Structures are given as structure tokens and as C-alpha cells.
Image (cartoon, helix red, strand yellow):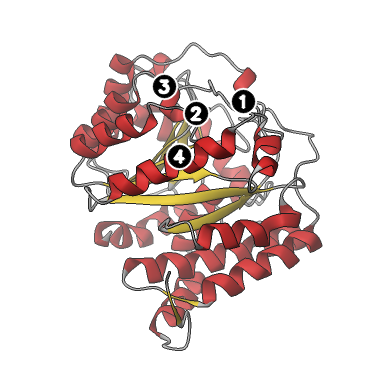
Amino acid sequence: MTGVLARIPFFRTYRRFGWPKMLPINITLSPSPKCNSRCLTCNIWMKRENELTLGEWDKVLASLGTAPYWFTISGGEPLMFPGIVELAKLAYKHCQPGIINIPTNGILQSGPERVRAILESCPESQLIINLSLDGVGEKHDFIRGVAGNFAKFEERLEQYLELRREFPNFIVGIHSVISVFSVGHLDELIAYADQSGADQFITEIAEPRVELDTVGLPITPDKDEYAAAIDHLITYVNSKRYKGMARITEAFRVEYYDLVKRILEEQDQVIGCYAGWASAQIYADGTVWPCCVRADDLGNLREHDYDFKAIWFGEKIKDVRRSIAAKECHCPLANASYTNMLMDAPTVTRVGLKVIQPDVMTVTKS
């Protein structure tokens, strides 16, 4: 993490002046859009792509070297991807990431054994599994579009919590998408997560994304309704006593929730976006995006000899960067937002003050 912090001034300079050239520290890999959920907030399961092979991923990841610190392996349902273990191994081999994050819907019975294989193969990386939960009981099944999903969620949660006892580098989280369908029962989700035994409870607001084929769908909650609900979550987080890295993480989480409220209210970036500089996404067919919301086609790795740098330092990306820097877009995408907050001096200052204040987060974590 120290190496990431040391690079922050260079990313700021890169965004402003175009130098020094920097590879992203936060990369999302989307090896396949295939999914066994039928969520009301996502249509990615309908997509089929000419997916990169593991041999192609090997070349791509080798071209990145050790620049990325944080990998998210996304989907679809990432644990459905037949080569998920091998893909994680390749990222670990070439990039030596500090964090590998994998969201999952918890449906796949073989998920825990695949996660175990990743843990055994990537001992120096922190592996985070975030189980999706959009409601308690039948509410979850309704939003996710799969009968019995909640029961499978609880079964997987217990399996992952058991696995956590064996691997000190393993974090088990619960992740909720706050949409028009779930904003009214966020308190219920908070209460469930609090007694679940999971290491963390995180939320992300539902939003139209090119990747999910949801542009134009009314899935984002009303800004006032969202603000009222998320204030309860902020109160919950601030009521806890976190230690070490968790204290820093939760302080950033509160900043993110406040940031989302401001973005919805002001319809503006609020803080500078570093998608296209410090964060990126590689889609299943090899197309490089600055983020999954805009999904600008920066180039396909198959057409650039699988060399990420050829796209990242090429000509096509320049116009997209100009557009992002000019605030021609604004979104509350969590993955990019956490990187953006790390690059924003006022945000980092507020986080630092929260971390050192003894009266913040004052109740023992359950």
C-alpha cells in the first residue's frame, strides 16, 4: 500500500499534464458476462462475447507488470468462468497485486472450492469475496430473479466464514446494490449484515451502465430517498469501533456514501475522476474501457498484440481523457470512486482526521 500512496502525486501530474506516463493501479477484469442471476437491475446475463482465452489473458497481464495493486474480477458471475482460478493465478504471477476482489451471487455450489484454490495459489494477496445481498428472504429472491437464492446465499456465507478460519488473507463481505427495489429496506439489510459474521457490509447505488445494458432503465433510487436511507448506514458505520486497516477502510466508505449523495444532488463529478488514468476495465472480448459506465472503446488488446500499454499510452484514449477531465460525465461508480477519493487531497485529509479521532466509531465491532 505504501507504494500506491507514493504514486499518487504522479497520477495527479499525469492527469493534468500528460506525464509521467503511469499504468493504472486499479483494474477490473471481466472474463465473461455469463451469469446465473436474473436481476431486476442488470441485463448482462443476456450477453455473449468472443471471450479472451487464458493464453490471451496471460499475455495481457504480463504486459501490465506489477503496476496494478487492486484487481476486481467481475462478471456476470465470475465464479462461473471456467478459468477463474487460473486467471487469478496469472494476475498473481505477473502483477503481484495487494488485493484481489471477487463479487459473487452465491448460487454456484462449487464456488467455495474455487475460492479455496485461489487462496492457496495467491498467499501474499488479500482475497476479498463479496456476497451479493439485495434483500432478506424472499425479497432477495425477487430482486435477483432466482427462487431459493437467499437460502443459497446463507449456505455460501457459512462456507466462506469457515474458510476464513484457515486463511488469514481472506475477507468475507456482504454487498448490496441500492436500487428502487431495495432502498426501502436498507435498514433490514444493515441489521442482517450486522449479525451475519461477515467482515464488512458495503453498498453501491444502482445506476445505468453500458456494461450491464441498463442505460435508460429506471433503477436508480430518488436522491432524497437514497440520502435518507444511506444516512442510516453512515450512522451505523460511525457507531462501530474498527481497528487498523479496517478503520481506514470504513472512513473511506463513509466518504463514498456522502460523495454519492452529492453527485446525485449536484449532477456533477464533485471530485476529479481518474478513470482512464488510475483505473481501467478490460472487458471479456479484450476491449479496454476507462470504466464500465461509459465503456468507451479505447482499443482491443487482440489488435495490439495484447500489450495494454499500447492502448493506455496511445492516441485514441486522449479524447476520452479530455472528456472525463472536462466533467462531461459524472457517476457514483464505487470501484472508480474509491480510487478517485484516494487521489483527492481534501478527502484523504478528512479520512485521516476521522481515523485519529478517538470519538469516531466508538462501539465495539460485532
Asked if residue 80 can be seen in this view, the reply is yes
Q: Element at badge 3?
A: loop
In the displayed structure, would residue 262 be above or below residue 316? below
Left or right position of 241 against 217: left
Q: Element at badge 4?
A: helix
Three-letter code, disc 4: Glu
Which is nearer the N-term, disc 1 or disc 2?
A: 1
Residue in front for this viewpoint, 234 or 5: 234
Residue in front for this viewpoint, 28 or 233: 233
Counting from the top left corner in percent of width and height, residue 113 is at 30, 30
In the displayed structure, would residue 162 be above or below residue 63? below
Distance of mark 4 from mark 1, alpha carbons? 25 Å
Distance of mark 1 from mark 2, alpha carbons? 10 Å
Left or right position of 363 against 164: right
Asked if residue 105 can be seen in this view, the reply is no
Foreground mark, 1 or 2, reads: 2
| Disc 1 packing (10 Å; few <14; some 14–19; many ≥20) | many
Q: Circle 4 sits on which residue?
A: 155
Left or right position of 160 against 359: left
Three-letter code, disc 1: Ile
Counting from the top left corner in percent of width and height, residue 25 is at 36, 47
Q: Residue at x 33, y 67 (%)?
A: 245
